[in-house]
Each structure stands twice: as C-alpha cells, then as structure tokens.
Amino acid sequence: MKRSCIFVSIALLCTSLSSCLNDDDKGKDREKIVEMTIYPETGYGVNLLDDIWTEPLVFSDSDENQRRLLLNIIVEGFDFDYERGYEYKIRAKKVWMHNPPQDVSSVKYVFMDMLSKTQVIMENREEDLELFISSEIVKFTPSYPNEYEEGGSVLKTYNAFRAKLTRVENWVLLTNIEGFDFENGYEYILNVKKVTQATPYSVKYILRDVLSKEKKD
C-alpha cells in the first residue's frame, strides 16, 4: 500500500512539474537553428489578399526538407543579392511565433549567415515541352531583378499567360511565347521549345506547334 502511495505521489509531482513548465512556455516563441536551401529557379505565386502574381524564392529547410515557396512567410535579414542559376545554403533561425500576424505563416525565418553559393545551372540547354495555356490572362510583376516604371518607384506589371506542363500541377507565368498569338477566352495545348541560357541566366519559350485550341465556356 505504501509503495502504491509513493507511485501516486511521484506521478502527481511529475504532472505538476510538467504543468508548470508548460505554463512557463506559454506566450513564448519557439526557435530552432536550421540550414535553408534556396534553389536556382524561382516559383510563381500570389500573396494573400492580392491578385498580382509574383516570383517567390523556392526553399527548403533541414527541419522539414520539403520544397516550398517563400510566400506569405516573414523573413528578417534576407537582403543578399539572389541570382538565378545558383543554389544557396543559409543558416537561419526558424521561429514558431506564438502570436503571428494575420494572413501570414506562423513560422518566420531570421537570417544568420551565408554558408555557400554554388552555380548549379552551368550549361545552356533546350527542351521540347507540351504546355497547357489557360484562357485567363493575369497580372504579373517580375522579380530578381525587379523591373520599375519610368521614375524608378513603381514596379512594372505585365499581362501574362498562365501555363503548366500538361502532366504537372504547378503553374508558371509567361509574358511571351515567341510565335504564339493568344486569343482571349481560349485554352491551348502547345508544343514549345524552352531555351535556357546559363550565363547570364535567362529562359525563353518558342512555339513549335499549336496542338489544340478550345473555346472556354
């Protein structure tokens, strides 16, 4: 009986200590040092409460190891000059905010130092692709580098096609496909040549053939 009472007392003490520790942690951010990878090509996405597409960085961290867009995520100190074609390794503080601002991720990243910058797209290449083109034209603001209207204070905004590989769900934004005349309200499947230049990095698309054109209801 005494042994049983002792076990009960120990259990109650552990529960009490755990409760105290949890109370101490309440209202505090949780932090972890991670290694981030910034990939050599940007993605495409739209910020919450906005309708203009942008080119966010694509990243992963050593905590989750999953590629994501650096979009609607708070970052601090990320003022390095990003160049497409290079992969970056960064040491950062990953912070789970107990009281995050509205409309953003509850996780933010704080830059600590640059570990490496490595050119990974080193050769020019050409690819034949099959692209689906949406009937919808969207507004798009390029990044890396930003482009400004005359006067240098307002970012340029372009009309862009929403396109994706026919077997892939990720959208890309294209302001031009050489030789392609888009007609509003129609969906297309195109055969195109994608030409990537390594240095300086650039990408262009050239129409090979219109495989289908269908009126969107």
Image (tube, helix red, strand yellow):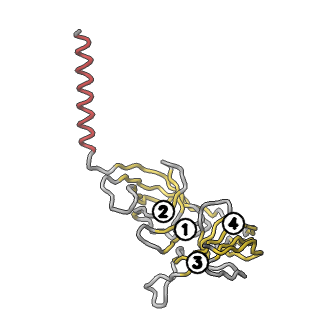
Label 1 environment density (alpha carbons within 10 Å; few <14, some 14–19, many ≥20): some
Query: Looking at the figure, which quarter contains the N terminus?
Result: top left
Q: Which residue is mark 2?
A: 70
Label whose residue precedes the other's in the sequence (2 or 3): 2
Identified by mark 1, the residue type is Tyr
Q: Label 4 near label 1: C-beta < 8 Å?
A: no
Identified by mark 4, the residue type is Met
Q: Which residue is mark 3?
A: 160
Check disc 4 and report its element: helix, strand or loop. loop
Label 4 environment density (alpha carbons within 10 Å; few <14, some 14–19, many ≥20): few
Residue 108 vertical position relative to residue 207 in the rendered view, above or below = above
Q: CA distance from mark 2 to mark 3?
A: 21 Å
Quarter assignment of residue 212: bottom right
Label whose residue precedes the other's in the sequence (1 or 4): 1
Check disc 3 and report its element: helix, strand or loop. strand
Residue 100 vertical position relative to residue 80 in the rendered view, above or below = above
Q: CA distance from mark 1 to mark 4?
A: 23 Å
Identified by mark 3, the residue type is Ala
The residue lying at 53 percent from left, 70 percent from top is 55
